[in-house]
Amino acid sequence: MNEKEVLINSKLFSERYIVEDKIKAKSYKKGQFISDFFDKEYYVGVVKAGQVSIYCISSDGTEVNMSILKEGDVFGISNIFDEESLDTVLKCKSDVYVVFYPKKCFIDMMKLDISVALEYSRYCNRKIQFLLRKIEFLNIQSSKKKVIEYLLEKTSKNDTILLECSKEELSKRISLSRASLYRELQSLQNENCLEFGKKCIKILNKEKLTQILYEI
């Protein structure tokens, strides 16, 4: 898949109005940071390969994990009308390849193709819903409820969560210490709510988990 096809497959770009000589691509090593500003210009980025962690730094220096970008995911697009980068940090979890397109060219594309503008509106709507859920999650004080909220959000149709990261990385995503995560998982397993292993968590009693989550 070439760089233009990567942009098109994200569903946010119009094949007809992409200016190919404006497309840029960059490779990053694991542990490197990614910026949407370089060569004196702001860019929208699409991940072609690899994974990227997005997190914020709180006032006390704590890292708050926001999300993980994977192949096909877009970044730097929520603030295309603002001449400043968002206060988030993008760090490569693996070797990463990113395709970039200038924000000003993306804005021009929306003016030329109404379907791009509509898709961008849908994207922003999904992003707002995600952030509202994230705020609600961060306001949860109970460690157990944080774990339950995360598991219920991530569970699949067969009530199984396949872990794509280590327990240490998972604890960061939930904003808990590793010890607290293990303690709560073990407690929920003892209550026959779930079973957990190195790479998988199986939900056994979703109704009981939901009941615990909404207990006052």
Image (cartoon, rainbow, N blue to C red):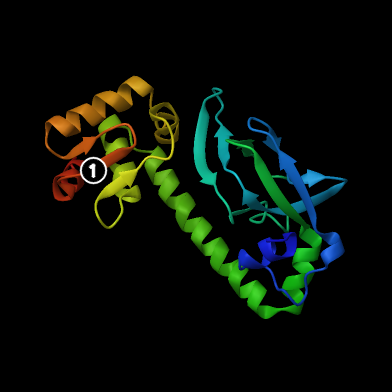
Give how far across and how far down residue 175 sits, in percent: 42, 31
Which quadrant: the N terminus? Answer: bottom right
Of 163 and 155, nearer the camera is 163
Indicate the quadrant where residue 123 lies.
bottom right
Give how far across and how far down residue 5 sits, in percent: 69, 65
Q: Is residue 141 left or right of residue 123?
A: left
The residue lying furthest to the front in this view is: 1
Indicate the quadrant where residue 115 lies.
bottom right
The residue lying furthest to the left in this view is: 191
Q: Is residue 12 above or below residue 195?
A: below
User: Which residue appears at 18% of the width and 49% of the height?
Assistant: 206
Tell me the element at label 1: strand
Give how far across and how far down residue 16 sits, in percent: 75, 77
Number of residue marks: 1
Q: Is residue 105 above or below residue 164?
A: below
Can the viewer see residue 65? yes
Q: Is residue 117 left or right of residue 215?
A: right
Residue annotated with mark 1: 202
Give how far across and how far down residue 90 sits, in percent: 63, 39
